[in-house]
Image (cartoon, rainbow, N blue to C red):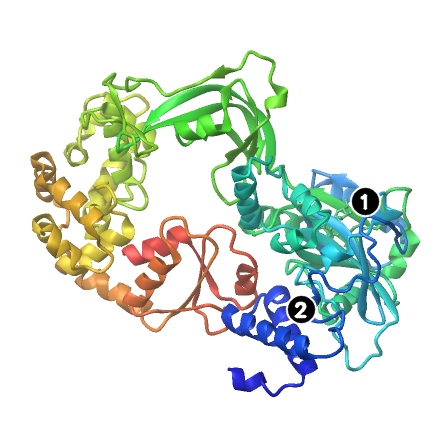
Amino acid sequence: MSSDFESFPVEDLRELIRYHEHKYYVENQPQISDYEFDQLMVKLGQLEAAESQSPPVDSPTQRIGGPVVENSRGTRIQHHGPMLSLENTYDPEILRSFDQRVRQALPGQEITYIGELKIDGLGVALFYQNGYLSYGATRGNGQFGEDVTVNLRTIKSIPLRLKAVTSEPMPDQIEVRGEVFMPKAALDLVNQQRDANEEPPFVNPRNAAAGSLRLLDPGITAQRPLDIFLYHLSFGIDLQTHQQSLDEIQKFGFKLNPYNEIHTTIDSVIDYYHRLCQIRHTLDYEVDGIVVKVNDLTQQRVLGTTAKFPRWAICCKFPASQVTTRIERIEVQVGRMGILTPVAHLQPVEVGGATITHATLHNEQELIRKDIRIGDQVILKRSGDVIPKITQVLPDKRDGTEQIFRLPDLCPDCQSPIQRSENETAVRCVNTECPAQRKRRISHFTSRSALEIEGLGEQIVDQLVEADLVKTVADLYQLQMGDLLGLEKFAEKKAGNLLQAIENSKTVALPRVLFGLGIQHVGQTVAISLCENLLSMDAIMEATTERLQEINGIGEKIANSLVGFFSRSENRNLISRLREAGLQLAAIEASTTSSSDRHNFFVDKTFVLTGVLTTMTRAEATQQIEDLGGKVTGHISRKTDFLVVGESPGSKQKRALELEVEVLAEADFQRLILR
Ligand code: IVH
């Protein structure tokens, strides 16, 4: 590619880099690889170094340590009109009162609203003089903010120079306002680093953004992955509607939130609130609600402001996704591999719309590292569409009654001595007869990713094991109506449904059965690959470690685990019993139909992956799709057939909705590859 730009005048190269910065940081649609982009930057650095005069302030090389007009960081800056805050409610029905108030003040007029997400970060104002970023400031007390220009310049989605709108003259001065934020994944990384440096973690994204923007060294700010969404044109151009200002802001090269929406009724605004509340956990930045704004700027002026709030806008918050609660006690759970996990029983709290009573504490090391004690106040956070996590202990809130907790020396379920090995964080119960392990092995077998037996969740599995009706998964297939009717809360209908679901599970494809056995290191992808290569349970059982390692993706660890598992007579016996019960243990017949369905399904289909997949890596998912005849691309377009979304998928999901591309949740995608 070097020949493309080597002969460029230096300003053309700057323009090319600005173009790619905008594509990457503002539009989220990179046109070249990171490597190619870095090469352009290197080249520009060289060309600028060879020039006699210093580079212009808006050169992409001047984001960090560029010529600061005056070293004014920390000084106060007066805003162009006060930066107000917003009236808050948690109740979407209050939006109706807001609507009535607006309509009463504007009798007979048509009202249009714009719904926006309320981004959880730090509000800033950016001032451009003759098209160049002149300064940027925090909100401060609303009248005066703190000058943080040098740090704001490091945010790549902030243009150092406005993009020229060809049909219009460049305005002399404009001020725009927006929210600087740190994406969730970046916040986790920054907190991990802070933890390693024994610095306290940022409690929330707002603190992270504020802390990073107010650093004295812009070189460090530049390493913090900050971003910005603009939501207000506060000075410089007279327009009729807020929507027009947003369009204008976008034309100048700023980043807008993709979820802004126009509404003509308050019902539609309330619907917007509920829709966004549902998807907010999938976004890769924190939001704490929606902001509803009257669209017409003349109407906004008529409505006016109170001392603190505009009367033309309101914020309706989502239920908190981060709360403080107390650990009431710690219980030890035994997993299917015998691993002991401490689980916190919490004072029940609502987080992100769900009442939470438990949270895993992972392992003993984690307890020690974070110094988590019974009775501690903790911060509980729901960030992905996942189980909430304890992110922080609040030692300042201790009153001295808190108790240190350590894992026991005996298994809490079967009382056999537990094993602590030097090189493993895990503490295990090694008694394979342990009833707790049995229960979890059976639950794994019946789970959605394995045999998918509806109505056979953990509680019922516990009931069946405790009543001695089921010891191994093969016993499930011997259950009779009479056995179930003897159990508490089992009437004929429930028992019948369960027996039918168990019967139906006999036809699932071999990879699900293999995965359901819960062999250590044999996840879904490995199970599929084993079945595709060896074609039957018998062949997998008889395969030597050498033969297994010939299969792509199977190394020594997995091979040893498989051979070890199938060398035990109780496991071979289990397979015979499953076969006798009528389970399908050959891949060939079982898959002649399903495999070709699968084949037909994936062939020539284009997939895009986004977000963090929890059950496999992206490389594994890509491999699966390609093995089945599909294609994986990096960018979503009308030609994309499916978008597979993991946690925190970002803007691609919104794009998929716009382009009517079908969205597959990770679990649905898994089901397709396991068909
Ligand atoms: S509008 C007068 N829109 O929330 C209008 N603010 O509590 C005030 N914020 O200081 C701002 N997302 O920092 C507006 N889409 C959005 C917003 C937003 C986040 C912040 C902003 C403001 C605070 C008000």
Residue 442 falls in image quadrant: top left
Q: Amino acid at mark 1?
A: Ser
Expressed as whole percent of the image width and height from the top left, the position of residue 250 reads 72, 68
SS of the residue at dot 2?
A: helix
User: Does 662 appear above or below 49?
Assistant: above
Crowdedness near tag 1: few (<14), some (14–19) or many (≥20) residues, C-alpha within 10 Å: some
Is ligand 1 within 8 Å of the beta carbon of the residue shown at mark 1?
yes
> Marks 1 and 2: which is nearer the front?
2
Task: Report the front residue among 510 and 490.
Answer: 510
Q: Residue furthest top?
A: 401
Expressed as whole percent of the image width and height from the top left, the position of residue 398 reads 60, 18
Is 147 displayed left or right of 623 in the figure? right
Q: In which quadrant is the C terminus drawn?
A: bottom left
SS of the residue at dot 1?
A: loop
Residue drawn 52% across the image and 66% down it? 660
Q: Which residue is mark 2?
A: 61
Q: Which residue is mark 1?
A: 85
Residue 580 falls in image quadrant: top left
